[in-house]
């Protein structure tokens, strides 16, 4: 079974620039999450989708972050404009009720803002 | 708000010894408690989980215990091996949803 796919794996941008990350969840998983993991910390939930609808985006800094999952499968997370403190790993994850709501993570997209 | 505290932040053991990592949570409605292992530069991988209707669960060298009254749960690794070296994260569900809040992680080093 293919896992959660993410790209790009690594990105270095200057502050105030924009960046977009893509995620393809495990086939059939209705729920998709974006987590932010700052070095030395645990993952922090940014946004949760159920199919193509947003379930929870209360922790998403909406002045600079946006995310969409238009067709209920792939998702894109965008940051514009980026700040130094956005340097982190952005982890996409997915789950479904068949898996008992177990959350499976992708390898992450490493962002460095300089 | 909801919070998960994890201790210790680093743990060094000799190969063959046991390792114990402890977490406490604040939300009495949490009902799902997974543990993830994250090797350097890799994805967090689920190694074991427990639900609130169970007090203990074991899978080979790994076990998790849950004390709902005290709101804490622990990961036990026996007969540690060098390949167990990684960062371990505990997590707790927010209320009884499928959203997780993570602890700050424990860096486990197993020395041969």
Image (cartoon, coloured by chain):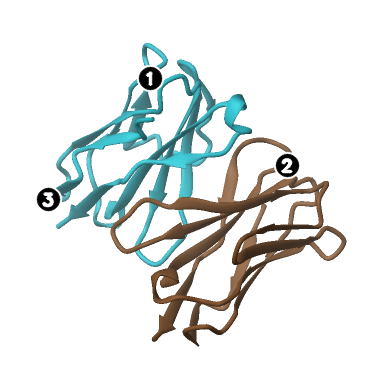
Chain colours: A cyan, B brown
Q: Are marks 3 and 2 in contact (CB under 8 Å)?
A: no
In the drawing, does residue A43 fall left or right of residue B27? left
Give above or below for A51 relative to A109.
above
Label 3 or label 1, whichever lies nearer to me, is 1
Number of numbered discs present?
3
* Tag shown at residue A69: 1
Where disc 2 sits, the SS reads loop
Residue at screen point 75% across, 45% down: B31
Neighbours of disc 3 within 10 Å: few (<14), some (14-19), many (20+): some
Q: Which residue is mark 2?
A: B95
Where disc 3 sits, the SS reads loop
In the drawing, does residue B61 fall left or right of residue B45? right
Residue A16 location in percent, x, y?
17, 45
In the drawing, does residue A98 fall left or right of residue A84? right
Residue at screen point 43% across, 81% down: B110
Label 3 or label 2, whichever lies nearer to me, is 2
CA gap, disc 3 to disc 2? 39 Å
Neighbours of disc 1 within 10 Å: few (<14), some (14-19), many (20+): some
Q: Which chain does the numbered disc 2 sit on?
A: B
- Of B88 and B97, the residue lying toward us: B88
Q: Which chain does the numbered disc 1 sit on?
A: A
Residue A64 location in percent, x, y?
32, 37
First-in-chain label (3 vs 1): 3
Q: Quick check: do tags 2 and 1 share a chain?
A: no
Give above or below for A114 relative to A59.
below
Residue at screen point 64% across, 58% down: B3
* Tag shown at residue B59: none
* Tag shown at residue A14: 3
Neighbours of disc 2 within 10 Å: few (<14), some (14-19), many (20+): some
Residue B89 location in percent, x, y?
52, 61
């Amino acid at each position: 079974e293919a896992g959660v796919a993410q790209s790009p794996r690594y990105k270095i941008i200057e502050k105030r620039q924009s960046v977009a990350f893509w995620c393809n969840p495990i086939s059939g998983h209705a729920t998709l999450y974006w987590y932010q993991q700052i070095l030395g910390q645990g993952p922090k939930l940014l946004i949760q989708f159920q199919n193509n609808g947003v379930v929870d985006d209360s922790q998403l800094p909406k002045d600079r972050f946006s995310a969409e999952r238009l067709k209920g499968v792939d998702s894109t997370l965008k940051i514009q404009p980026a700040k130094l403190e956005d340097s982190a790993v952005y982890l996409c994850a997915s789950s479904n009720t068949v898996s008992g709501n177990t959350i499976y993570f992708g390898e992450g997209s490493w962002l460095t803002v300089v | 708000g909801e919070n998960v505290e994890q201790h210790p932040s680093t743990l060094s053991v000799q190969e063959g010894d046991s390792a114990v990592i402890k977490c406490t949570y604040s939300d009495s409605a949490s009902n799902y408690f997974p543990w993830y292992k994250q090797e350097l530069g890799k994805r967090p991988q689920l190694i074991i989980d427990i639900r609130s209707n169970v007090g203990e669960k074991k899978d080979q060298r790994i076990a998790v215990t849950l004390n709902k009254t005290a709101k804490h749960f622990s990961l036990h690794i026996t007969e540690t091996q060098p390949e167990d070296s990684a960062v371990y994260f505990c997590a707790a569900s927010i209320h009884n949803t499928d959203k997780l809040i993570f602890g700050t992680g424990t860096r486990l080093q197993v020395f041969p």
